[in-house]
Amino acid sequence: VQLQASGGGLVQAGGSLRLSCAASGGAFSSYAMGWFRQAPGRTRELVASITWRGGNPYYADSVRGRFTISRFNADNTNYLQMNNLKPEDTAVYFCVGGRDRLGPFDYWGQGTLVTVSS
């Protein structure tokens, strides 16, 4: 499975962005999907994930209530809607896929940079 992430950019604090992850080359609908982020000097963090059926989403405490993950198996895409963004959300975000929503994740896309200015 190949994963292609997009949608990152520069946004002011309080703003919104939507990240997209397009999957190809495999049975996308069989995999749990998620998003990690990595900021300089910080531990890589699983931000959100969702089961292959699209239910039971997981959210890190740091984003719960602000981020929403969704997926559309018909077009092999999942999305991360990010609202009320904060400067501490600044990171490179990676789309991932695996057998379980809590990992391990066998498939990683390239990162997309999200920068939130204060």
Image: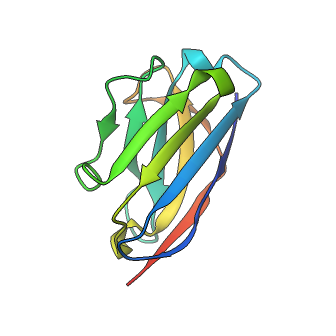
Q: Nearer the viewer, residue 45 or 95?
A: 95
Please tell me whether residue 34 is drawn above or below residue 85 in the rendered image: above
Q: How many marks?
A: 0
Is residue 84 shown left or right of residue 3? left
Please tell me whether residue 52 is drawn above or below residue 114 in the rendered image: above
In which image quadrant can residue 59 be found?
top left
Q: Residue furthest bottom?
A: 118
Is residue 65 shown left or right of residue 21? left
Q: Nearer the viewer, residue 10 or 98?
A: 10
Quarter occupied by the N terminus? top right
The residue positioned 40% from the left and 27% from the top of the image is 101
The residue positioned 48% from the left and 46% from the top of the image is 80
Please tell me whether residue 88 is drawn above or below residue 38 in the rendered image: below
Measured as percent of width and height from the top left, residue 13 is found at 37, 76
The residue positioned 46% from the left and 55% from the top of the image is 37
Quarter occupied by the C terminus? bottom left
